[in-house]
Image (tube, helix red, strand yellow):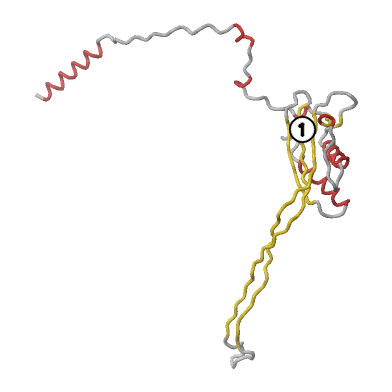
Amino acid sequence: MLRRMMLGLSLLGLAACQSPNPYTAVSNPLPPAPPQAANTFDASAYPAPQRDYAHYRNWAWLNGQLPAGSELIDSAQVAEAVSNALDQRGLRPARGNAPADLHVAADMRLETRLQQVTDYYGAYGGYGYDRYGPYNHYGNGYGVYGSVPVVRTYTVQVMVVHINLFDGSSGQPVWSASAETSSQGSISERNNALRDAVQKALTAYPPS
C-alpha cells in the first residue's frame, strides 16, 4: 500500500514538471542614454593616478608669504632652513615670474609639553649582630633592601615646525608633515634645533 502511494506521488510530481509554466519573463528595453553621456567623464569611477613627484622641480612660497617665526627665531631663519632642506631634495626656487611646480607653506611655533621623569631612591632597614659569630660569619638578623620610585613632572618648551606643499597648477595638497625638537639652549643651539626639525619633517619626501 505504501509503495502504491509513493508511486502515485511520483507520477503527480512528474506531471506537474511537464505542465506549462504559467509565469513568463518580460523585460522592458533600457531607456536611451542622454546626449551628454558621450561627453561626460566620471572621475569617481576610476582610481586616482599615482602622483609623479619627479615632475616637481622648483617651488615658491604660497601667496608669496614667508614662514611665521617666533620670539626666539625670526621668519627669515625659518625660511632659510626650509629652503636649504628643499634644495637638498632637488627642489630649486622658481626664477622670476615663472610659475612654480610647488607652492610651499611653513610655520614654526613654540608649544609646551609635560615630561615625566622617574627617579629611584634607595631604602634600607634591618638589625643584626655587630660582630662575627663562632662560625666566622655575620650573626642572625634581617634587612629590607629596595628602591622607591619618585615621578617628577616637568614643563618643557618645544619647537614645532609644519610644512605643507601644494601643486602649483591645481593647488591640491601633495605633502604635509611636522616635526618638533627642543627649544632650549643658546641661539646657535636653537638654530641647529630648527634645522633638525625641518629635516625631520621632510625626511620621507619624496615618497618612494
Q: Name the residue furthest right.
A: 96
Left or right of 152? Residue 64 is: right
**Left or right for 175, reference 34:** right
Position of residue 30 measured from the top left corner of the image (x, y, whole percent): 49, 8
Q: Single out the residue that lies furthest toward the front.
A: 71
Q: Quadrant of the C terminus?
A: top right
Q: Is residue 198 visible?
A: no
Q: Residue at x 81, y 54 (%)?
A: 184
Q: In what element is the residue under mark 1?
A: strand
- Give the image location of residue 163, x and y in percent: 77, 38
Q: Is residue 107 above or below residue 174?
A: below
34 to 156, vertically: above or below: above
> Are there few (<14), some (14-19), or many (20+) residues within 10 Å of tag 1?
many
Amino acid at the residue labelled 1: Leu
Choose top left, top right, bottom left or bottom right for residue 172: top right
In the foreground, 28 or 72: 72
Q: Residue 158: in sight, yes or no?
A: yes
Decide: is 132 above or below 76.
below
Please state if 19 lies on the left or on the right of 94 as rendered: left
Name the spot of residue 27 as percent of width and height, x first: 42, 9
Q: Residue at x 87, y 54 (%)?
A: 186
Q: Which residue is mark 1?
A: 165
Split into 4 quadrants, where in the image is the N terminus?
Answer: top left
In this view, 99 is above or below 90: above
